[in-house]
Amino acid sequence: MPRILYWFLRFSLLNPLCIRIVGAASRRQRDLYIRSGYIAILASVLLFGLFSMTSGRGFSLRDLAAGSAGVFAFLAVIQLLLVCLLTPVFMAGAITKEANPRTWDILLTTPLSPLQIVLGNLFGRLFLIFALLIGALPLMIVTQFFGGVPLETILLTQLVAIALGLIVAAAAISLSVTRTAGRKA
């Protein structure tokens, strides 16, 4: 493989730190409970919203579409709030965890640059946030069954949530790097 291509791949999801973080998170019980809780909260908000929308006796298709749009708007706001709360949880200690003496020595032996180390941590933890958002996508699509919510709106909402996750994650990583324990990294 050409050396330049190998160097650029280290700035992508193929970064060894990114692969290690995603692999370790898939085995942790805490992360499983966080992901399950996230989906459970969104599913319960959706169910309660849809049940309250359809509990009235005489409703028309227009009322169903308007109610579905209202439920979707509330669900989108809850999702954005959860992304703001869960992104720092996944990002906590991104660089400071690497400053642990056991992993620090191993990390120094790799041919990764400081930028590749930071981006590997960022991409690995962002992957977990993106997995949450992809897991919530079917819940968002359920609101389409009643009408009133076009697919473009659902996808744009997911893009806004991804952008919000990226901003919060970048802020968390930058705070982690600038703090005392992360200065070594």
Image (spheres, grey):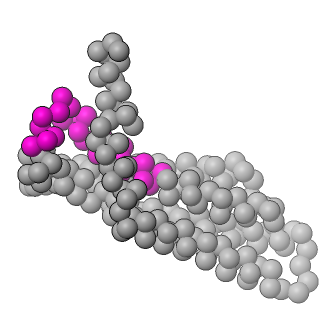
Extreme residue in the front direction:
27
Chief secondary structure of the magenta span?
helix
| Percent x, y of residue 76 | 59, 63
Question: To which quarter of the image does residue 93 belong?
Answer: bottom left
Name the quadrant of the N terminus: top left
| Percent x, y of residue 74 | 61, 70
Identity of the residue drawn at 68% across and 71% down: 71
> Position of 158 compared to 164: left or right?
right
Question: To which quarter of the image does residue 40 belong?
Answer: bottom right
Identity of the residue drawn at 37% across and 49% down: 22
116 inside magenta stretch: yes
> Position of 37 compared to 106: left or right?
right
12 inside magenta stretch: no
Extreme residue in the top direction:
2
Identity of the residue drawn at 23% across and 39% down: 117
| Percent x, y of residue 140 | 66, 61
Give above or below for 55 relative to 147: below
Residue stretch rendered in magenta on the structure: 105-130
Identity of the residue drawn at 24% across and 49% down: 174
> Position of 63 compared to 52: left or right?
right
Give above or below for 6 relative to 147: above
Relative depth, front residue between 141 and 13? 13
Relative depth, front residue between 120 and 183? 120
Question: To which quarter of the image does residue 142 belong?
Answer: bottom right
Name the quadrant of the C terminus: top left
> Position of 71 compared to 87: left or right?
right
Residue 60, can we see it?
yes
| Percent x, y of residue 12 | 37, 33
Relative depth, front residue between 26 and 83? 26
